[in-house]
Image (spheres, grey):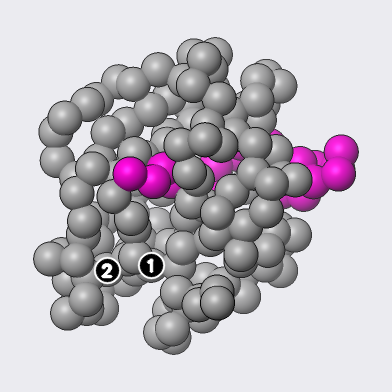
Amino acid sequence: MFKTTAIYENRILNRKELFSEISLDEEGNEDTLFYTKFENLLCSGYERIVFGDHGPYIEFHSSQIEYDNWTCKRQGVGYFDQYFPRDGSGILMYAQRVSVKNLPNPPKGRWTFRGNRKEGYADYKVGMFYISPWLKNLKIMKKGIVINNQKCSLSDILGG
């Protein structure tokens, strides 16, 4: 049975904002496609939306990733590897290497909330991949229709 991760006030507000602007389902599907602004397919389908204290992230299984369109820029350091599209569109995908269950607060960023969570700041799963739904160079399509408004840059997500 599906269980939401929007269980705290800040996450519930993030959920409300996201779903008011992007027609995604919190529980994933295989029909939604994710492209760069240059029309390169990045992912086919998704698992779920994770609401944590660093904002919402779309979660992908490795079978949903179009690896030919990605390059790994940082690997084997810290909690995640970083992937970027080969077309230079600047979208960041995290490949979770280590659980964040021991981290009560997230790194700085636009949606950072310091909740001091004993269970960790987000329910990221080791081996899964994550992309912010707010990246402006990310195009999300469902049944041939663009469903996102591409409202922020990567520096907004990273707090830079």
Is there a contact, CB below 8 Å, between mark 1 and mark 2? Answer: yes
When the figure is inspected, residue 107 is found, relative to residue 16, above or below; the finding is above
146 with respect to 84 (left or right): right
Residue 146 on the magenta span: yes
Q: Residues within 10 Å of mark 2 (few under 14, many from 20)?
A: many
**Which secondary structure lies at badge 1?**
strand
Q: Nearer the viewer, residue 150 or 26?
A: 26
Residue 99 image offset from top left, x and y in percent: 21, 56
Residue 118 image offset from top left, x and y in percent: 17, 79
Q: Nearer the viewer, residue 98 or 120?
A: 98
Dot 1 or dot 2, earlier in sequence: 1
* Spatial CA span between label 1 and label 2: 6 Å
Residue at the far front in the pictured view = 1
Residue at the far right in the pictured view = 144
Residue drawn where x is 34% and y is 39% of the image: 95
Which amino acid lies under the numbered mark 2 shown in the image of this protein? Tyr
Q: Which quarter shows the C terminus?
A: top left
When the figure is inspected, residue 36 is found, relative to residue 47, above or below; the finding is above
Query: Which range is magenta?
Result: 127-149
Residue drawn where x is 66% and y is 30% of the image: 35
Residue drawn where x is 29% and y is 50% of the image: 126
